[in-house]
Amino acid sequence: MTQSIRAEEVKRAWVVLDAKDQVFGRLITQVATLLRGKHRPYYTPHVDCGDFVVVINAGKVKFSGMKLEDKEYFTHSGYFGSTKSKTLKEMLEKTPEKLFFLAVRGMLPKTKLGRAMIKKLKVYKDDKHPHTAQVSKKDN
């Protein structure tokens, strides 16, 4: 018989992924799977059963094709004429963390559950991160 897991029964792990020389889309799908908890045998859709994910070297990720020049990200404040756009190359140089959050957010549920899942994603531009204490813990 299939059993659903409850939120208090979930044991979360900390996973560190190095983005250096990895293809962006492949890495993002892996991150979304870990945050959602779909890699676990006890995955339950209505429970946040995913892990914490730390992505390092976010600025050194690879893109295929002409995406760096062609792909654009738009922002709009709500006022007339306030639409601004940035290319993927500009976003990667200035704020690669935001790039990761935008891409992963699109793969998670658009509910309170999805907003809770995205909070478990930690992205850093270089290889230093403040989560060494959590990551180095061994499972008991």
Image (cartoon, rainbow, N blue to C red):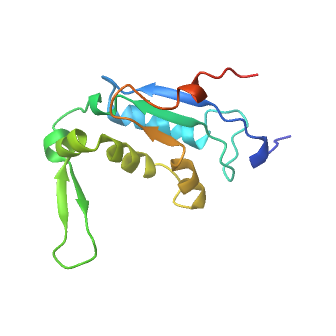
Q: Is residue 5 visible?
A: no
- Relative placement, left or right, of 3 versus 94 is right
Q: Quadrant of the C terminus?
A: top right
Is residue 68 in view?
yes
Residue 121: x %, y % from top left = 49, 42
Quadrant of residue 81 within the rendered picture = bottom left
Number of disc labels: 0
Identity of the residue furthest to the bottom in this view? 80
* Residue drawn at point x = 15 percent, y = 46 percent: 70
In the rendered view, would you say 120 is above or below 11?
A: below
Give the residue displayed 52% in from the left and 31% down from the top: 131
Q: Is residue 33 above or below residue 6?
A: above
Residue at position x 21%, y 44% in the image: 88
- Nearer-the-camera pick, 128 or 108: 128
> Going by the picture, which residue comes out furthest to the right?
1
Q: Provide residue 11's location: percent of width, then percent of height.
A: 72, 35
Left or right, 118 with respect to 64, comes to: right
Q: Nearer the viewer, residue 50 or 121?
A: 121
Horizontal side of 124 relative to 50 (left or right) equals: left
Which sits in the foreground, 1 or 108? Answer: 108
| Quadrant of the rendering where the N terminus is positioned | top right
Which residue is drawn at the image coordinates 82% and 43% (left, top)? Answer: 3
Give the quarter of the image for residue 114: bottom right
- Residue 126's x, y, as percent? 33, 29
